[in-house]
Amino acid sequence: MIRVSLPAQLCNLANVHGEVNLEVEGPASISSVLDNLEERYPTLRGTIRDQITLERRPFIRYFALGEDISMEPSMNPLPEEIYSGKVVLRIVGAMAGG
């Protein structure tokens, strides 16, 4: 069971509260987690990553074990602590401006 924390605006869009729990088959990666998340909550398609290229949206970041893993290849395996559900995978909406 993988626990995923979403930004408030995506929680509202998916009509969920708090964390989302996902079952991911095989080795879990950002890509497989997002595939599962978008399948379960179709309203999130295109909000976290581009629907065609599957590239991360510019103002979205992924955090595992307190580390920003946004720039790592999306097929890299996630740490065991994430895969086992001990630690939450955080999807964060970044801000910019001044």
Image: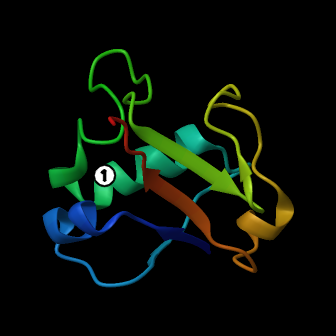
Image coordinates of residue 61 in percent, x first then y, are 52, 43
Circle 1 residues within 10 Å: few <14, some 14–19, many ≥20:
few
Q: Quadrant of residue 47?
A: top left
Secondary structure of the residue carrying tag 1 is helix
Q: Which residue is mark 1?
A: 39
Image coordinates of residue 22 in percent, x first then y, are 49, 69
Tell me which residue sits at (19%, 66%) in the image.
Answer: 14
Q: Is residue 73 above or below residue 36?
A: above
Tell me which residue sits at (78%, 62%) in the image.
Answer: 65
Farthest residue, direction front:
98
Q: Quadrant of residue 31?
A: top right
Farthest residue, direction top:
53
| Closer to the camera in the image, 29 or 48 | 48
Q: Is residue 57 above or below residue 42?
A: above
Image coordinates of residue 71 in percent, x first then y, are 65, 27
| Closer to the camera in the image, 43 or 13 | 13
Q: Quadrant of the C terminus?
A: top left
Image coordinates of residue 21 in percent, x first then y, are 48, 76
Farthest residue, direction bottom:
17
